Image (spheres, grey):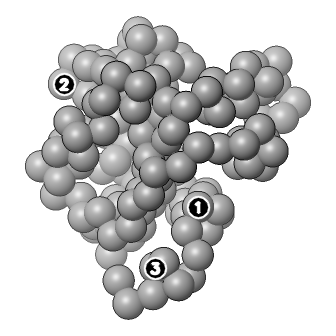
Amino acid sequence: MERTLALIKPDATARNLHGAILARIQEAGLRVVALKTLRLSPEQARGFYHVHRERPFFEDLVRFMTEGPIVAMVLEADGAIARWRDLMGPTDAAKAPKGTIRGDFGTDIERNACHGSDAPETAAFEVGFFFSGLELSGL
């Protein structure tokens, strides 16, 4: 079994889409093993997206991710990372096919409704960023 982090971003929570997104996750056979709603501070958003700190869009990304609540989840399944990324669709929602979460609920490359880890090493960091061992123990 593999685990990955999934985030429902502020654009989707503002439109009350978290129920629809959760339903798609479960319909796709991904198991939600941890879930919480929170609002990131600018410092937390900068820490989470630290790999992008040298990119020109970094501060816009921080502003966006702190403008409202997010839903953070740990998903589990065989091949969870690839399965969640397939369900999300391409990063640019304007280019994402209908039937994917980003294609149906996102609007552009930033306001694309969701986030997912891209590799096992990234997933380990990202899951640990949002969830403590206690929150994941016994799951």
Look at discs 3 and 2 and give the one toward the viewer: 3
Q: Is residue 124 visible?
A: no
Q: Which of 87 and 110 is in front in this view?
A: 110
Q: Mark 1 points at which residue?
A: 130
Q: Name the residue under label 2.
A: 99
Image-quadrant location for residue 30: bottom left
Q: Is mark 3 on a helix, strand or loop?
A: helix
Distance (Cα) linking label 3 and label 2? 31 Å
Look at discs 2 and 1 and give the one toward the viewer: 1
Q: Earlier in the sequence, mark 1 or mark 3?
A: 1
Q: Mark 3 points at which residue?
A: 136
Question: Is the C-beta separation of discs 2 and 1 under 8 Å?
Answer: no
From this view, report whether residue 23 is shown above or below residue 59.
below
Q: Which of 62 and 124 is in front in this view?
A: 62
Q: Which residue is drawn at 58% across and 61% down?
A: 130
- Residue 20's tag is none
Residue 124, percent across and down? 58, 67
